[in-house]
Amino acid sequence: MATELAQTIAADNFLIPESAQPPRRLLMGPGPSETHPGVLAALARPTVGHLDPFFLQLMNELQEMLRQVFQTRNRLTLAVSGTGSAGMETCLVNLISPGDRVVVGVNGVFGGRMREVAQRAGANVLAIERPFGEVFSLEEIEQAIKSHSPKLVGLVHAETSTGAMQPLEGVADLVHNAGALLVVDCVTSLAGCPIPIDAWGIDAAYSGTQKCISCPPGLAPVTFGPRAEEVLRSRTTPVQSWYLDLGLVSNYWAETSRAYHHTAPINMNYALHEALRLVLQEGLPARFARHRYHHSALRAGLEAIGIQFAVAAAHRLPMLNAVLIPDGVDDVAFRGRLLRDFGIEIGAGLGPLKGRTWRIGLMGETAQASHVLLFLAAVENCLAAQGYRFTPGAGVAAANEFYTTAR
Amino acid sequence: MATELAQTIAADNFLIPESAQPPRRLLMGPGPSETHPGVLAALARPTVGHLDPFFLQLMNELQEMLRQVFQTRNRLTLAVSGTGSAGMETCLVNLISPGDRVVVGVNGVFGGRMREVAQRAGANVLAIERPFGEVFSLEEIEQAIKSHSPKLVGLVHAETSTGAMQPLEGVADLVHNAGALLVVDCVTSLAGCPIPIDAWGIDAAYSGTQKCISCPPGLAPVTFGPRAEEVLRSRTTPVQSWYLDLGLVSNYWAETSRAYHHTAPINMNYALHEALRLVLQEGLPARFARHRYHHSALRAGLEAIGIQFAVAAAHRLPMLNAVLIPDGVDDVAFRGRLLRDFGIEIGAGLGPLKGRTWRIGLMGETAQASHVLLFLAAVENCLAAQGYRFTPGAGVAAANEFYTTAR
């Protein structure tokens, strides 16, 4: 056997690749965002077992910190062992039974994904649609609820594909009056702008670690309120996903049972623990204000060189700035130069916005004055390289003017 | 808003926990296993974007290295963004359409899990059963195929709950002659003992990172052969999981498309890359031999102090040693002392074996002479503390005798 294997490998002439040494990037796209060095250090701490008393205590602390960040008292608050889309699927497959009626707001890629996941869970989905970059009015949501009588309404708070923020105040009342659940995607907004789960009456929500929490991707914080828990308890068919079955997953997270379900991504949970500590040390109000502040500086700089936002002022996400690519500027060449010469990543447009917008992230650790200034200086360089006409230095000057005068 | 939040936090009297500093453990349970310091260092390298040219190149290299470790040329070989159980679910939900007939071998917890996941995917499952710790004969498998005419046969190569290894030579012929697919769980065996996917005709297989690959948990290597790919292509219903839909996932991994699906766990992929390099630098034949070698030393030591294996000699996994807890020895007290006084983790019995067996892992980096000797010395200490009668020093002496004389 041994000889045979050695020959296989030799016959393939297989060369083992070099150890991977990532380039240093400035992550200003739609996520992952910059991480604090302390979070990367936590990631590298020695692995322990998934039932180790130390790890069980860490899980307790994670749950408590996630509740603070979600601004909820929901018992069922934990980190799913997958990325943000696994969080979406967790919320939908646990709450939907085949044949359930569901309303989903689709005004971007992630609303579309919610519809798709709900359909795969067997739901009868009514999708209400708005053009990418716009948001839904209370009246539109109310109308959809009246016409479809859903068990569940799914909305994206922060549409990562468009940079638009869906207003959610008042939505829960409409949804609850119709006896339905409100499920919200806050992948991009959590820890970056207010999304107070309890105060807004949100029944279930999911997020990711790699946006405003500033932890590498790999886990999906989710929270389920009492109404959602009741739906879980009263299911008569099993959740279609075993891996994401919250009944089983929560038996592992619950201090009273700790029943083995799957081997948790131990080190990712270390990193999330450290990242949440940094979020709470800063404090949510200060963190939200910081995101707005640097968003304003970035806006001042971009507008000073003639770059316009793709989303109406009232509905812009502070942590994800979608702007229109100026006429005559080549999208791929611009982003290529920004990455190659300055190590700066921004996001391309998604779906119908591909080639029409850039998505500039100011999430978590990325939202700093030094990043905004470097970014604007580099943007001026890359625009000039394409013959785009603007007053050289105007972008940086406007941001500096903002930083000098605003408080 | 800001003031209100500050008050909420103050009213909760919330204390931010200390930074989590894990104790140093020696991981000798059923996984996670010990990791090489270089793998932890890779985990902490700076995060880049999931579409960064550097990361796309790393994905190519990961696929090539995974093919080497699986001993396959399967194009569709990649790391799913979840732990081993997500790998199981990926294989089953992609290959099963509702109503499909499936045969699953259940001789442990993970066979039982396969049955459960297949049922949730809508399969009509015939489970063939053997007592925990035993394995299936070719005749039993053949009989089940004849009686159920399945589309898919699922078997666990290395039953992590029992320590038994299912012989697989000849199984693919039976399965293929009946027009079915062979799907194999090699979570615990991959990179620890031979599981040559192509040579054995396995159509789809899944594993985990935290066993013999010696990487922290968080990713699930999977491989799909041509027959399995054909089943994927000819599906008429969507895969029930969007997150695990290999059609979508492979569009992200394929060099020709790179279509965004979800944000990959970037840093976990760095760690897997480094861990696979170490596996291939050692070479599979040497690595398999190393696992057998230290298993033999451990066995000599345990038998010298009267501890018996739970699995017949012909079917023992070298990397996961299930032994019977001696009469009169308290399971919980024994494992508690081992962890508290020596930092050594071993696994408890699962399912019907709870309280009856211990599971001692020698996976990947854990399989070293120093770990075996320390473990035996600590076991002698913990057994003596419970008044168990044996010749003090006999376990360590027997292992040393083995190490001194065997080659």
Image (cartoon, coloured by chain):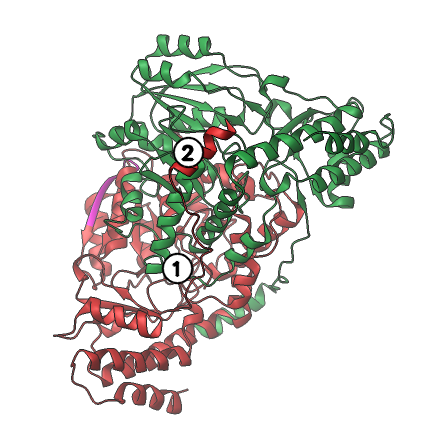
Chain colours: A red, B green
Give the residue pinned by disc 2: A8
Residue at the disc numbered 1: A200
Residue extent of the magenta highlight: A121-127
- The image quadrant of residue A137 is bottom left
Where on the picture, by quarter, is residue A156? bottom left
In magenta segment, residue A67: no
Residue A234, visible in the rendered structure: no
* Spot occupied by residue B97 in the image (x, y as percentages of width and height): 28, 27
- Position of residue B314 relative to residue A273, above or below, is above
Asked whether B305 or A183 is in front, the reply is: B305
The CA distance from mark 2 to mark 1 is 60 Å
Name the foreground residue: A135 vs B239.
Answer: B239
SS type, badge 2: helix
The chain under label 2 reads A
Q: Could you say which is closer to the camera, residue B382 or residue B125?
A: B382
In terms of secondary structure, where does tag 1 sit? loop
